[in-house]
Image: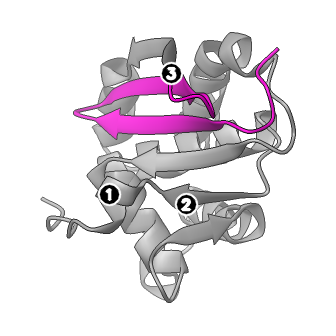
Amino acid sequence: MIERDSAIALQLHSNVLTLTHHTAAGSVHQLMTAPLTGIYALLGQGNLTGAKVETAISEIEDLIMPALRNLEVSIDLKLAGHALQRIVQLLDNDGKSVSIAAIECLFNQLVDVANGAPVRLYQVSTAPDDILALTLLRAVMLHGRFSSASLSTSAAHTSSPPRQ
């Protein structure tokens, strides 16, 4: 069981997911590392569709569920990686934290766009790295029972590079 006074770090760098547990005592334990290149490639092929989003959700959930099973509800979720940072900054005025409600709202916009709604009507990005980050963050927050997530201290002090 992962104790309460600790944090989980979700990192997404170069389409590689890393989840680590940071204890109050200062130790760090890697929970998982997984390449997400197949999911990224799927999201980048042709037009975004509801079926692609559903496939991405399913594959991400299969990867993260074993690592999230033993989490305490009150644990903190810290984020690192440029695509995750862009999502937080898009949804939060201070650009440091985001609620599950805001993530759900943005994800619902993504689903609307995937089902044919014009992207110009929404604030959601359809860049494959942003879709991957949003889908991953939503899954981790829902299945890890996180009510909010915040940028890690190092991520909060760096600017996000422009999307390509």
Alpha carbons under labels 3 and 2: distance apart: 20 Å
Q: Specify the segment rendered in magenta.
A: 1-27
Tag 3 residue: 27
Image mark count:
3
According to the picture, the residue beneath numbered tag 1 turns out to be: 155
The answer to whether any part of residue 118 appears in the image is: no
Q: Nearer the viewer, mark 3 or mark 1?
A: 3
* Circle 2: element type: strand
Q: Earlier in the sequence, mark 3 or mark 1?
A: 3
Q: Position of residue 61 (x, y in %)?
A: 67, 23
Front in this rendered view, residue 88 or 113: 88
> Up-down: is 55 above or below 77?
above
Q: Give the residue drawn at x 69%, y 64%.
A: 108
Q: Secondary structure at mark 1?
A: helix
* Tag 3: amino acid: Ser
Q: In the rendered structure, which disc, 3 or 2, sits on the residue that comes first in sequence?
A: 3
Residue on which the image places disc 2:
150
x, y percent for residue 139: 67, 39
